[in-house]
Amino acid sequence: MAHFSKLRFLAGFILLLFWAAALAAPVCRAELLEMADTELAAVYAAGYTKFSWKTVGTEDIARMDINVEARMFANIGSLKTGYYTGGWDQDWASVQLGDAANDLVAKGLFVEMGFDTATINSPSARTLNYVKIGTPSMQGDISGTFNSFSGTISGAGITNVSRQNLGTTTITADGSGASDFSMTLSRIAGTNQMGFSFQWGSATKSP
């Protein structure tokens, strides 16, 4: 009987501690609530993002620009994209973005999508031609062994090449007004190269 009383006392003590903890820390609940129009009208922000839509030739182009500055110094062992017909569009090894003394700097970021104008208004047939991600201004080095490179390096005499071996080299973006940089995935050849391609707007290559 004494043993049973001790167990009952212990159970009661544990229950008391539980309720004490529950009363000391009341339960808090959070939920998502839609803001009223008057609340939204009181929120002001400008200059961070910009959305645009335009028609160029046979494509409707949607674009989002983000007003941020990104800096990086990073190493990538291997970068490969676009494997088909027995080869890679991009095959880079021992890649270095920036260096210990100078970061690779991107001023502004953007995401752009090009749709076929002829099918843009048909939900069942709407066709995405390409996706492009990049920056309107980049400064700094990207180094590595470019076993396969597809794209353009303006200023280095490389224009719309496909799966070209550039060897071990450093590509330097000068940060000028024309120093845009982007990666594009395109399903057709036309405005962009088909497959994965990289574009430097103003850069040099050494060696």
Image (cartoon, rainbow, N blue to C red):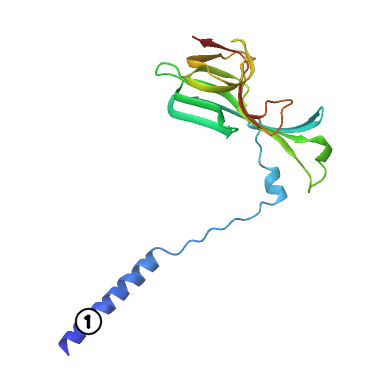
Q: Amino acid at mark 1?
A: Leu
Q: Residue furthest front?
A: 86
Question: Eyeballing the image, is 46 above or below 155?
Answer: below
Report helix, strand or loop for mark 1.
Answer: helix
Quarter-of-image position of residue 150 = top right
Q: Nearer the viewer, residue 76 or 149?
A: 149
Q: Residue 182, percent across and down?
A: 61, 25
Q: Would you place residue 133 above or below residue 5 in this image?
A: above
> x and y percent of residue 31 in the render?
57, 58
Residue placed most toward the observer, 132 or 137: 132
Residue 42 horizontal side relative to residue 54, left or right: left
Residue receiving disc 1:
7
| Looking at the image, residue 58 lies above or below residue 200 | below
Tell which of 196 and 107 is nearer to you: 196
For the N terminus, the image quarter is bottom left
Image quarter for residue 148?
A: top right
Q: Is residue 185 visible?
A: yes
Q: Residue at x 67, y 25 (%)?
A: 193
Q: Is residue 207 above or below residue 21?
A: above
Residue drawn at x 20%, y 85% as measured from the top left: 5
Q: Nearer the viewer, residue 66 or 129?
A: 129
Q: Is 202 displayed left or right of 8 in the figure?
A: right
Hey, which residue is sitting farthest bottom in the picture?
A: 1
